[in-house]
Image (cartoon, rainbow, N blue to C red):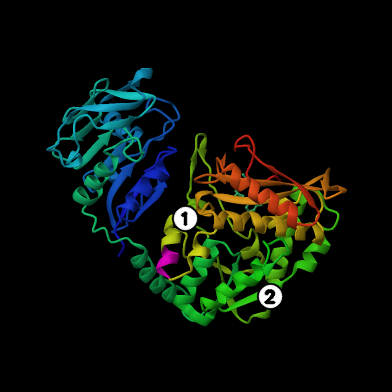
Amino acid sequence: MQEKIIILDFGSQTTQLIARRVRELNTYCEIVPYNKFPENDPSVIGVILSGSPFSVYDEKAFKIDLTTIRHRYPILGICYGAQFMAWINGGSVEPAGTREYGRAHLSYVDSSNPLLKYIATGSQVWMSPGATITALPENFSVIASTQKVECAAYQADGEKLWGVQFHPEVFHSECGTQLLKNFVVDICGSHQDWSAASFIDRTVEELKQQLGNDKVVLGLSGGVDSSVAAVLLNRAIGKNLTCIFVDHGMLRKDEFKSVLRDYECLGLNVIGVDASEEFYKELAGVTDPERKRKIIGKGFIDVFDREAHKLKDVKWLGQGTIYPDCIESLSITGTTIKSHHNVGGLPEKMNLKLCEPLRLLFKDEVRAVGRQLGMPEHLITRHPFPGPGLAVRILGDITPEKVRILQEADHIFIQGLRDHGLYDKVWQAGVILLPVQSVGVMGDERTYERAVALRAVTSTDAMTADWAHLPYDFLAEVSNKIINTVKGVNRVTYDISSKPPATIEWE
Ligand code: XMP
């Protein structure tokens, strides 16, 4: 049985970060909505209560009955979680003065307390904004303070129940990792046996149990998630897994062939379907970005469905859905569920059961699993690439000729990034073919040809992004090479917009 920490999510933006930090301690954890504690799960070894956008005295504040967890598990409340436990037990919580927010230093630490072992006075912490505990319940004791906040951390006397009014999960809290380790390992008794290797062993066993001799079909995109899901499934059920990799004609230069070869080398049973002509036909003359997306999405489902129907007795659809895609996240107004399907509508249309072996992993854990499975590094560190591919990077209508021009220019840019050791320093990069022609000179001739934009961004999650500050010399080299070798392009620009307000893609 995989022991786990449960994180009750009261809606804080840093809840996922808490989960990341716990997993970095090689301890498995799950985020569940604040009111969905898994009462009969014998694998739970401890509970963390997250922060919240609300304060306990707000009318809409999320509240729970602590009796289901108190005295049963070690509990750590973070910010709102700490304030809620103090308040519900008779303490006082009041709006905080602005100077109590953010960066602070611990001026008093009871380092004999197991939660604060190895944490020194003076250590920097990131304090919770909004509210603060002004009086603790009886039988709760202060175990750490800052200059401004007496109760930076507390413990219920003689009980395994703690609260901290700072965020141990954020980078700015210097002692945060130590504090979480104290809680998860020393107090909850985690054996720290969660690793890529243990995940693979367990998941392969579970998949064998779940799937038996059933047949599974899986759509490969060339991206890391679907590739790792396929290799994992292949390890569990071998030839009962059939993968389908569709070329919609909007992939990068030579990508269809090279990725197909990679998949074959990995021992996958993969069918490559070149459907580019079909897609070009459907897309001819279409300029509206959303229409282009819809046509490609529907076309993909049609091709996949057609190919899958050629297979006999398929019962399951494998997908590379990962944890951030399916965490139930709370919005301030109530519970909003973020749902996600890489190929929306497919399971319903095909009447297949869904098998998502990576649904509990974060992206970097997926990469670690891929490495552990022996997959090549270039598949694992590949940049994200949009499902509709180059279609959203050709502004306006799509023709095979435009795809060719863009593939050539894109190839020069991406290869350049690799050659200069810059590829892994950016989150994502590509070239956009603009619906603009401009005047230029080539030798003695005047030209009137296309302009392209280079786009490269840094990011951690694609929700926000900054334009990558690539060296001028590098940009100059790429620009020269594109103009000199890609027929039809005579001008190169560099996109210096950040997201927001711009987006990463242009369409
Ligand atoms: P934007 O352009 O919204 O992109 O800043 C954020 C991330 O999502 C990718 N993206 C897509 N991925 N289908 C996808 O599978 C799409 O239609 C799509 N549009 C954007 C984009 O490449 C970036 O990583």
- Disc 1 element: helix
Q: Please rate how many residues cluster around mark 1, counting C-alpha atoms within 10 Å: few if below 14, some from 14 to 19, many from 20.
A: some
Residue tagged by mark 2? 307
Provide the secondary structure element on which disc 2 rests.
helix
315 left or right of 212 in image: right
Q: Residue at 50% across / 59% down in the picture?
A: 381
What residue is shown with label 1? 363
Residue 441: % across, % down: 83, 46
For the residues labelled 2 and 1, the Cα–Cα distance comes to 29 Å
Vertically, is 38 above or below 107? Answer: below
Question: Residue 158: horizontal and vertical position, in percent?
Answer: 13, 39
The total of numbered circles placed on residues is 2
Task: Give the amino acid at mark 1.
Answer: Lys
Sequence-earlier tag: 2 or 1: 2
- Neighbours of disc 2 within 10 Å: few (<14), some (14-19), many (20+): some
Position of residue 63 measured from the top left corner of the image (x, y, whole percent): 38, 35
Task: Determine if residue 79 is in view.
Answer: yes
Residues rendered magenta in the picture: 369-373
Q: Quadrant of residue 133?
A: top left
> Foreground residue, 431 or 233?
431
Toward the viewer: 245 or 249?
A: 249
Image quadrant in which the N terminus is located: bottom left
